[in-house]
Amino acid sequence: MKINLAAVTDMLSFDAGADRVVPPTGFTARLTVFTAGAMAFLAVFALALSLASGRLAANWRDALAGSATLRISAPAAQMAAQTERALTILSETPGVAEARALEPDEQRALLEPWFGPDLPVESLPVPQLIEVRETASGYDGDGLRLRLQAELPGAVLDDHTRWRKPLVSAAGRLKLLGWLAIVLIFGTMGAMITLAANAALAANAQVIQVLRLVGATDTYIARAFVRRFTLRAATGAGAGVLAGLLAVVLLPGAGSEAGVLTGLRFQGGHWLLPLLVPLLAAVVAFAATRYAAMRVLGGLR
């Protein structure tokens, strides 16, 4: 359905006489306000989820990019020598910026979530981990693995690619689902407003017939319904956005170990994005009500 600027201006222009065609209260008024408010509330959370998922994907990608872990499994008597040899190999490898063997306390911290804080790392055959940081140009992973296999058969190089890509992909899909949810929310809003407008027009069929008898055009009649429903939707959506922003503020903030559920708050200029929701709700209400009004008025001829 094509809507030009002149039609929008004409439909939204104030006309006290035309406004009396639409009941100011009633079931359709409450339904429109409630639907717009509820959908706007959900849209705020869908927007927050989408933006948080995007940040999470970027954080995972940046945190894990350019890093790798070398795991050395060897008898206790040979562990120190093999670790020293691995560090030497890494220092001679072009593209490796830094290589550092993790201390027992650091390895204990990595294992603590699974085995508790009292794990005796020193007395257990725990592999030695070496943190590897690469330069911007990177290193030849296949070549490094071949050298390690030849000199240190118990060394395994993990560049995090195996589990980094699924995590980033999952966060990206969650972001896409958030935007899809927003589209569905506004689609549902448009459908509900169309039903409410249809009900209001049908309930006022006799009034519409009388108005036509005295010379009122369909545009004049539709103008009243479009304006009333657009303002109701914008008002309800504004209240829903305020409630949604308040709920988002009350959510836990993003910490150093932020995930999707702990980083749902908006950040920076993203706090302004929910303010677009009432405007979009008004656009949806305008289009839905105009479509319903023209279709119903055409059927009442």
Image: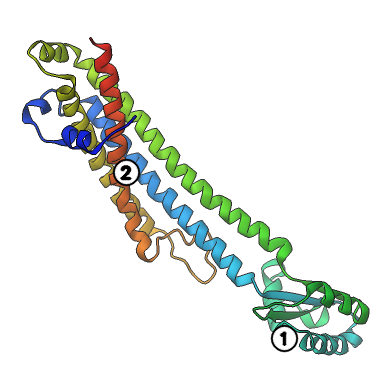
Q: In the rendered image, which quarter contains the N terminus? A: top left
Percent position (x, y) of residue 15?
8, 31
Q: What residue type is labelled 1?
A: Arg
Q: Specify the quadrant of the image occupied by residue 157.
A: bottom right
Percent position (x, y) of residue 254?
47, 66
Q: In the rendered image, which quarter contains the C terminus? A: top left
Residue situated in front as seen by the camera: 181 or 96:
96
Percent position (x, y) of residue 198?
29, 21
- For numbered disc 1, what is the local secondary structure? strand
Residue situated in front as seen by the camera: 218 or 245:
218
Percent position (x, y) of residue 227?
19, 33
Label 2 neighbourhood size at 10 Å, few (<14), some (14-19), many (20+)?
some
Residue 154 visible? no
Label 1 neighbourhood size at 10 Å, few (<14), some (14-19), many (20+)?
some
Q: Residue 295 carries which label?
A: none
Residue at image point 14% right, 24% down: 220
Q: Which of marks 1 and 2 is in front?
A: 2
Q: Specify the quadrant of the image occupied by residue 115.
A: bottom right
Q: Which residue in the protein does label 1 denote?
A: 100
Residue situated in front as seen by the camera: 188 or 17:
17
Q: Is residue 179 left or right of residue 193?
A: right
Residue situated in front as seen by the camera: 26 or 189:
189
User: Looking at the image, is 65 positioned above or below residue 5?
Assistant: below
Contact between marks 1 and 2 (CB within 8 A): the answer is: no
- For numbered disc 2, what is the local secondary structure? helix
Q: What residue type is labelled 2?
A: Leu
User: Looking at the image, is 90 positioned above or below residue 286?
Assistant: below
Q: Which residue in the protein does label 2 denote?
A: 280
Distance Cα–Cα, label 1 vs label 2: 53 Å
